């Protein structure tokens, strides 16, 4: 505990990533590339996060058609680009626009297999240029291991103006303007065109309004109606995805939100008004409502003392307990933006809010930048995701299977930095559930995190960090384990496979795993690399009683690897799909459904071939694609826990129902002492709750014993097989015995109760015999 004690005075506040207005950040993942516009004299720092992997850099100069490293202050030889070792499509497109091709590119290799984790490479831009950083893959990494990621920071020179913070254009720019602080601008947009509202320096709000042009031509004002929009979006404001539209008073859609890098806005309050400032003691203060009226006047739109508006980047919320509207500093960073597509011709207005008397603009109003893009611009649905607040933001992307899944459904949810199918149109979640129980299902699980732990001390690191005994793990075998902190709280769970004697693959749910493992390796002074495979490794879950029969039809396995029928629970083999020359896959006897099943890991370039082969082989067996909703029902019935529900802050591994994954026979691992102490005096247990009705409780619902609240529902659903609702909940040990009657509170917890009986987990197949079949 001594490391938490300090005699230094504490700062008044600490920001992580929010105020870094002179630093541009990018993350380059395994097999990928990243581009960033850098001005002359910018200092570029590239960190080899996992170590032991090469990186290539090149630049796209303003004066030369092809890519070379000449715009960087580098010494050493250059090399030809090998486009087969990364996804070169974006670089190829940029070169094609210049009349060049990939075979003309020169790169500067930095780092190699001997590079230590955390090693830095620093250089300087000698001219204004576009920097390209590439993370090349190693051949056969699916079989032998690989992975890498690189953190890039560009320190802007003092001479760089605010324009250096702007994101690169996303398509053909029709017009763009800078809206100076405390001003507004009106503009017209044609149907199909895109509007990008950019916060230039960060923490700056921008009121937005759009009028339907056809209504104005008829002498009627029809504009964004926040109440209609919230009702249709089923949310405080629309976000990229299925519910993404702003509507007017006639319930006609005006705009669709395509990209949003912040996800915190306001649709409840008015644009700031003269009256509002007067009542706070600031008469004559510039305000957005008057600015909007002035900007709209040339279009014949009547002035209003108070304008309703969508206030982008305004951080507001409704207090759940008292229902008050509250606000605080904006979450937006320099260069953050919202992109909307016009669904009809519009007359729009945008402001740069003048509020300098409370925190919403960081006490210092700045500018807003607007861009209008042509309708053919390749702008897809995306939001920003960060594993840590001071890391580069990652735009959500589609998995390698998306060309197939998107043809079958429009219902997608965000899973970390990736869009994953919620359910499929032809079957629905219940149909998919029964297919998994009776036949087979195929699910895109590419949002999982995959790390290769490589090096002579790989086993020592995993022994220190995991709750299971890794020394007993043979090649071609896996185990389920936890990563805990010193308090016994679960940081992540996952499955560990031994690929080779000193190569392990950790498949988990959170980026916290990679960060924690790397930190512990450095603290312990171990020779080991923790390498992220990123989105380069795609994976599917083939689950259900017919799954093994389907694989028999498509898998070819060499005699040196375990045969399919010999792969037992938590074992794996290396197979090829569709014949001896087909794509290589890692085939694991694992899953999250409680049924017989396998997980299939492959390179993203082979994803469609693997999907097609499995779909074709599975069709005669009744196999269908499955989404996340059906999986949630299956995993709750199977009593399987997930981060953010059964485990997370405030509960240790034992209280999370994960004691089976804690091996106290193992002499030492992080969190062991705390867990052993807590095991001697249990306070809470995770239990199952059987309800009598069909109404499912939801995460966070309170659990009562009479008038007293004693626990919390962690997950709940309607069980198709049992025919009634079920839930998992954390309750005191004294009330955890099977048969105990409790109540789940709805409404305010007291006005409505759902009676429930405590039962053991799992709800079905208590001996987990199906999973061992």
Image (cartoon, rainbow, N blue to C red):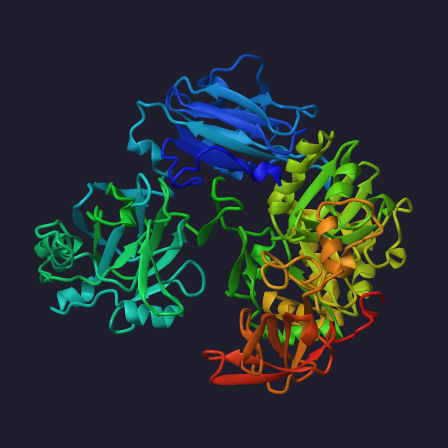
Q: Give the quarter of the figure containing the C terminus.
A: bottom right
Is 59 rendered above or below residue 652?
Answer: above
Is 725 rendered above or below residue 343?
Answer: below
Q: Is residue 578 visible in this depiction of the protein?
A: no
Is 468 rendered above or below residue 104?
Answer: below
For image coordinates 32% across by 26% down, the residue present is 160
Q: How many marks?
A: 0
Pinpoint residue 73: horizontal percent, then vertical percent: 47, 15
Pinpoint residue 130: horizontal percent, then vertical percent: 42, 28
Q: Give the quarter of the figure containing the N terminus.
A: top right
Q: Nearer the viewer, residue 16 or 511?
A: 16
For image coordinates 34% across by 37% down, the residue present is 166
For image coordinates 72% across by 83% down, the residue present is 739
Q: Nearer the viewer, residue 700 or 395?
A: 700
For image coordinates 70% across by 53% down, the residue present is 494
Pinpoint residue 462: horizontal percent, then vertical percent: 75, 42
């Amino acid at each position: 505990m001594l490391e938490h004690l300090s005699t230094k005075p504490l700062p008044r506040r600490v920001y992580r990533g929010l105020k870094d207005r002179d630093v541009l950040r990018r993350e380059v993942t395994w097999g990928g590339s990243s581009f960033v516009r850098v001005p002359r004299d910018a200092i570029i720092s590239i960190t080899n996060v996992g170590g032991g992997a090469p990186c290539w850099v090149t630049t796209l100069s303003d004066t030369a058609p092809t890519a070379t490293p000449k715009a960087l202050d580098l010494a050493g030889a250059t090399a030809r680009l090998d486009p087969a070792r990364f996804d070169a499509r974006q670089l190829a497109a940029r070169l094609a626009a210049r009349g060049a091709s990939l075979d003309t590119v020169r790169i500067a290799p930095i780092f190699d297999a001997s590079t230590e984790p955390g090693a830095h490479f620093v250089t300087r831009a000698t001219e204004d240029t576009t920097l390209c950083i590439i993370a090349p893959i190693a051949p056969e990494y699916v079989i032998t291991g690989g992975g890498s990621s690189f953190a890039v920071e560009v320190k802007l020179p003092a001479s760089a103006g605010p324009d250096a913070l702007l994101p690169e254009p996303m398509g053909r720019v029709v017009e763009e303007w800078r809206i100076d602080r405390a001003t507004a601008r009106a503009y017209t947009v044609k149907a199909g065109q895109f509007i990008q509202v950019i916060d230039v320096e960060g923490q700056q709000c921008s009121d937005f309004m759009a009028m339907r042009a056809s209504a104005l031509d008829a002498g009627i004002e029809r504009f964004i109606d926040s109440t209609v929009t919230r009702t249709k979006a089923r949310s405080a404001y629309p976000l990229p995805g299925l519910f993404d539209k702003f509507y007017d008073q006639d319930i006609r859609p005006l705009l669709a939100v395509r990209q949003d890098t912040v996800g915190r806005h306001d649709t409840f309050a008015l644009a700031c008004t003269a009256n509002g400032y007067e009542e706070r003691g600031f008469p004559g203060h510039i305000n957005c409502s008057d600015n909007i009226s002035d900007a709209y006047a040339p279009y014949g739109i009547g002035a209003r003392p108070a304008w309703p508006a969508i206030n982008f980047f305004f951080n507001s919320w409704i207090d759940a307990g008292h229902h008050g509207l509250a606000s605080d500093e904006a979450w937006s960073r320099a260069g953050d933006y919202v992109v909307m597509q016009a669904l009809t011709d519009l007359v729009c207005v945008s402001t740069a809010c003048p509020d300098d008397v409370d925190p919403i603009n960081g006490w210092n109003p700045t500018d807003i930048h607007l861009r209008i893009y042509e309708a053919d611009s390749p702008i897809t649905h995306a939001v920003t995701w960060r594993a840590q607040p001071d890391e580069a933001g990652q735009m959500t992307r589609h998995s390698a299977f998306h060309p197939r899944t998107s043809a079958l459904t429009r219902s997608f949810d965000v899973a970390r930095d990736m869009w994953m199918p919620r359910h499929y149109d032809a079957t629905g979640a219940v149909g998919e559930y029964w297919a998994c129980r009776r036949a087979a299902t195929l699910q895109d699980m590419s949002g999982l995190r995959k790390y290769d732990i490589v090096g002579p001390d790989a086993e020592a690191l995993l022994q220190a960090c995991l709750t299971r005994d890794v020394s007993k793990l043979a090649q071609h075998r896996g185990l389920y384990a936890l990563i805990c902190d010193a308090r016994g709280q679960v940081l992540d769970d996952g499955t560990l496979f031994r690929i080779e004697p000193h190569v392990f693959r950790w498949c988990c749910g959170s980026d916290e795993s990679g960060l924690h493992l790397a930190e512990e390796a450095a603290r312990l002074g171990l020779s080991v690399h923790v390498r992220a495979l990123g989105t380069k490794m795609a994976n599917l879950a083939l689950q259900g009683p017919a799954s093994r029969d389907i694989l028999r039809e498509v898998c070819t396995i060499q005699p040196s690897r375990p045969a399919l029928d010999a792969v037992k629970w938590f074992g794996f083999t290396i197979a090829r799909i569709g014949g001896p020359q087909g794509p290589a896959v890692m085939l694991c006897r694992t899953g999250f459904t409680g049924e017989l099943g396998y997980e299939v890991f492959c390179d993203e370039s082979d994803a469609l071939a693997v999907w097609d082969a499995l779909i074709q082989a599975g069709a005669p067996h009744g196999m269908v694609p499955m989404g996340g909703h059906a999986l949630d029902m299956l995993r709750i019935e199977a009593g399987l826990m997930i981060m953010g529900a059964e485990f997370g802050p405030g509960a240790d591994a034992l209280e999370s129902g994960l004691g089976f994954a804690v091996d106290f026979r193992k002499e030492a691992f992080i969190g062991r002492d705390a867990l052993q102490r807590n095991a001697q005096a249990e306070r809470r247990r995770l239990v199952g709750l059987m309800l009598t009705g069909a109404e499912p409780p939801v995460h966070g619902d309170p659990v009562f014993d009479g008038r007293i609240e004693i626990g919390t529902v962690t997950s709940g659903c309607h069980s198709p097989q049992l025919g009634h609702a079920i839930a998992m909940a954390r309750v005191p040990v004294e009330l955890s015995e099977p048969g105990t009657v409790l109540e789940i509170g709805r409404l305010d917890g007291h006005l409505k109760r759902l009676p429930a009986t405590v039962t053991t987990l799992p709800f079905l197949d208590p001996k987990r015999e199906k999973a061992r079949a």
